[in-house]
Image: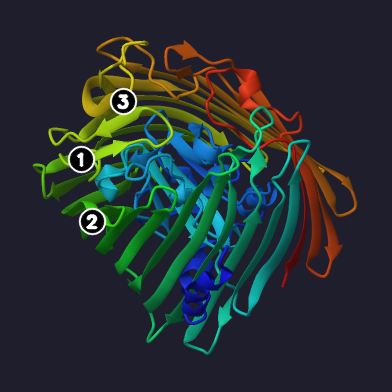
Amino acid sequence: MGRQRYAWLGGSLVCLLAWSPAWAETAETGQPRVGSLSPLVVTATRSEIRREEAPSGYSEVTREDIERQPATTLAELLRDVPGLAIDNEQDGRSQIRVRGFNPGQTLILVNGRRLNNTDELVGHSDFRMTQIPTAAIDRIEVVRGPTSSLYGADALGGVINVIVRPPEDTWAGRVQSRLGSVHPRSGGSERNLAVHAAGPLSERVGAMLSLDYLDRDGVLNPDQPGIDEIEGREALSGMGSLFFRPGEGHEVELFFHGSDDERRARRGDADTRELDIRRYSTGARYQFDAPTWTARVDAYRSRSDSEALHLDRRDQHTDDIVDASATYYWGAGQELTVGADHRREHFSRDREGEREHDDTVNHRGVLVQNRGHFLDDRLVLTLGTRYDDHTRYTGEVSPRAGAVYALTPSTRLKADYGRGFSAPDLRRSAADYDFTFATRPLRIIGNPDLEPERSDSYSLALEHEDERHRAAITLFRNDIKDLIDLRCIEFCDPGSRPPGEDELRTYINVDRARTQGVELELGRQFDDGSLLRANYTYLDARNRDTGETLEWRPRQRFNLLAETPVWQGAAAHLRGEYIGSQRRGEVRTRDYTLLHMGLRQSLGHGLSLAAGIDNLTDQRLAEVDDAFINEIRGRFYHASLNWEF
């Protein structure tokens, strides 16, 4: 698949993302807790806070969670988080929905910097999910609920912040080699090699480098000979940086993060769906830390370039961003955060050598937030707001209010309110957007009259957590106005489409929609090192104008993790996923369950061996319900050898 194309990525990474001693200090977590949470959180408030003071709807995926599964995408790493559901897309791709919101309404960050949002611009894409080397990840912070008051548009459903593994005072890293195979289906063999290293180059200069190579064969559909139900992939992703500390409290970071991804899906003897994706983020960060205040400035470009070779179509999406924020500790237990940012967004599409779409908009925003501790630190109040301006839409104000009250040292009551918004993307809101599917009689056109989506969100949580136990119940409700949905406008009824004509759909605003539900969490760490953890999510998502249930949103989800030592240096685990019924078209699908098992063995000297089976029962969606039009990976055997140095 043209491995020489990867030279641009490898060459760029050799000299570039940063070793940050400040991160190393922040990530000291001690023993992992049953809730899989670290003491300090940065995403929920854009400043460092203690985990127990985070708003309701906060979860964390730790390094230990990552090592339990053979994940190569961000979506796979997040599938056990409460309130999140996985969308199974075309060719086996995966996207995530947070509390019933669309995938494109969740902002994804890497070390606080956004990945350009291609989920809505390129249909059935998972580009944001596949760009991050998993060996580089220290933890993933997930904030469910609107955070538009801090991050602006795209944060309507929440924020996912991938935090890179921090370096130590000396060089340290990880090498991982994994092999896997799908059985009894044909194809699906997988080879993965990952390298991560970080450390000092001198007293004032440090460096970090991470590379991840994946080669996966497509999986043939047993019911349709010659057609892949899971696409093949060959991908190289990496990140690197240089860090310089010119003086006490000052940090400068030069970073590069990129990926080169080739997808291939066989569609018969003479047809292959081919997609090439290149993306990168590059820029600089300056950070200043003083006893009473901190400040940070990021200036960077994030670009995604995808080419559908079978359609002779090329899409390019670019964000040029300057983001500045500062926090001032102005009194006993009081902190004030202010910020401003500017983002220039450009999207273009070429088809058969002709420019089909080309548009640019500017996003600008300012924010202010204050967090105060009262009643001997038993009560934490957060009040904030943000004003956003957009080239095409009037200014949006996104207020936020939250309270955390400590009933006991380990039990807290949390309440939050937030308003969020999301402007229509440059594809759906374009008058000249006109796309006809090559594989089905369907045509989709843009709508320049679309309004931004807006939501008012409420949540109430009761949480208990100590060194051995975690229990939580969270109630949430999101009232959404002008939800953007795809609606048929011509040849909609079965049998009404004349020969040679396409069903015609366009994007519209649904006046009122609501997603509401409950999230339950329970976990315990036992004296012998065993771990039991479970969470359950119930979601009711409806169009309030018609009373219809919204599509692609499972009503129930249940996740279970059981892990126990089996002999010296070895631990075995069992993971379970229950996915409830969901609406697909005019019907509700049946529910299904996935089981995964694994074993990890320490060999000493930093070496460890892991093996397991994902989708133990070889569940197949086509056998669960005919309404599922996409597939998941079958029974997957995997083994890996890891070296920590």
Where does the image place residue 250, in percent across and percent down from the top left?
36, 79
- Amino acid under label 1? Ser
Marks 3/2 in contact by CB < 8 Å: the verdict is: no
Which residue is outermost to the bottom? 202
- Amino acid under label 3? Asp
Residue depth check, mark 1 versus mark 2: number of the one nearer the observer: 2
Front one among 481 and 216: 216
Front one among 348 and 560: 348
| Disc 3 target residue | 502
Where does the image place residue 579, in percent across and percent down from the top left?
58, 24
Q: Quadrant of residue 385?
A: top left
**First in residue order: circle 3 vs circle 1:** 1
Identified at 30% across, 56% down, the residue is 317
Q: Is residue 328 visible?
A: no
Label 3 CA crowd tier, 10 Å (few <14, some 14–19, many 20+)? some
Depicted 282 relative to depicted 565: above or below: below
Label 1 CA crowd tier, 10 Å (few <14, some 14–19, many 20+)? many
State how far apart marks 3 and 1 are (Cα): 41 Å
Residue depth check, mark 3 versus mark 2: number of the one nearer the observer: 3
Identified at 31% across, 66% down, the residue is 301
Where does the image place residue 513, in percent across and percent down from the top left?
29, 20
Q: Which mark is residue 345?
A: 2
Secondary structure at badge 2 equals strand
Label 2 CA crowd tier, 10 Å (few <14, some 14–19, many 20+)? many
